[in-house]
Amino acid sequence: MNSLVQKIRRSLERDSDLPMAERARKSLAYVLGTLLAPRYLREVTQRGPRARAVGRPFVVNDGVMCIGADLIITSTFSPVELVAQQGARLDIGSNVFLNYGTSIRAASHITLGDGILVGPQCIIDDTDLLAEGDVLASPIRIGNGVWLSGRVTVLPGTTIGDGTVITAGSIVSGHIPAGVIAGGIPARIIRVLGEADSSQTRVGTTDVAGATHGSGS
Amino acid sequence: MEGPLHVRNLGRISLGDHVTIRATPVISHLVTGPRGALWIGHRTQIGHGASIAAHDTIRIGDDVRIGAFVTLLDSDFHSAADHSAPGLTGTIEIGDGARLGTRVTVLRGSVIGAGAVVEAGSVVKGRIPAGARVAGNLARAVPSHD
């Protein structure tokens, strides 16, 4: 209960420059999202507490889906899609944020670590459709604290190390090491995350309506 | 305007004359933050499925043609150093007569010159000169095939 109060307090601090009406609207959406999450996520095999689902996601679980605590799914402008096919496994850690329009589809095994941010309209799909019509599935593993920007596509067999940032619109394949910024088509390392990133100055507001920054730590 | 349009305006939105924003078959949404401003010029057309979020300033000129599923974000929303910290923001400007293809993403602080053409699927960051033709992620000038 204490951590839920902390979450609410942090959200209110972050939104202190929004007009009252907007804060009220968001609070209502968050409360509704918390109340409806168990229903929206009822197909999930195993799920931690304090999930929040704003807007209705699309969840189909014919395999095994395990999600940690403090999940935030925002389906405001288009639904977040979580699909585990028969015999497949989708593991998602704690404090994960999935923004609208993102699609995660598992035919073999997809693993997302803790504290991950997934921007809008990302695609994480572990299947390749081969020319002959056959389907080849290769596991995907995304480490802790990774940030996928908007419209990132993660191809089958990809692994991304802890703390890495993938820039908008990238198509990621192969292995991306931990602690880097990578991007492009195909995604390549742009630079290593380091001291320079800690000195970025704050300029503007933080929220896109209906969504939240949910790393929650 | 065709179809329902989703607008959440906490800042200001200013539309010129004869602006077309399509919202079918996929809804478009315009969002401004409390300090955000969105300006759309005369006779500009925006395709369906657009995601336009102005937390700083987005200025779209006259006679601009924007394709479907375009994303204009003048904020990074997150910081690479600390994911719960706000990201950098920067004004987006799209000059008169520019054309953006389907599923183009325009990142914060980008300036697209008048009459420039951004090919489908491109990700724009930085400055695109007037009249240029660019493509890719990140968008770069397309070599001419003369």
Image (spheres, rainbow, N blue to C red):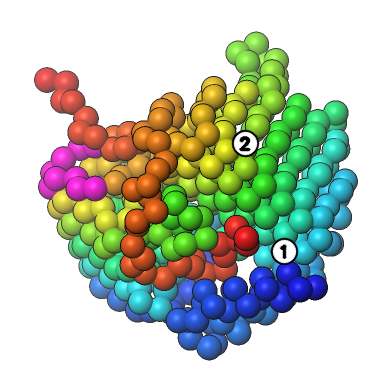
- For this rendering, which residue is in front, A131 or A208? A208
The answer to whether residue B14 shows anywhere in this view is yes
- Residue B137, quarter of picture: top left
Residue A14 place in picture, x, y as percent: 52, 74
Residue A138 place in picture, x, y as percent: 68, 22
* Subunit of label 2: A
Q: Which residues are magenta?
A: B126-134
Q: Are marks 1 and 2 on the same chain?
A: yes
- Helix, strand, or loop for circle 1? strand
Decide whether residue B64 is among the magenta residues.
no
Residue lying at the far bottom in this picture: please name it: A20
Compared with residue A173, is residue B21 higher up or lower down, i.e. above or below? below
Residue A176 place in picture, x, y as percent: 51, 28
Residue B95 place in picture, x, y as percent: 18, 56
Give the residue pinned by disc 1: A52
> Which residue is located at x 57 percent, y 38 percent?
A162
Question: Which label belongs to residue A142?
Answer: 2
- Residue A62, quarter of picture: top right
Compared with residue A102, is residue A130 higher up or lower down, i.e. above or below? above
Q: Which image quarter holds the C terminus of chain B? A: top left
* Subunit of label 1: A
B141 on left or right of A135: left
Decide whether residue B127 is among the magenta residues.
yes
Tag 1 and tag 2, C-beta contact below 8 Å: no
- Helix, strand, or loop for circle 2? strand
Say which label, 1 or 2, has the lower sequence index.
1
Q: Dot 2: few (<14), some (14–19), or many (≥20) neighbours within 10 Å?
A: many
What amino acid type is highlighted by mark number 1? Arg
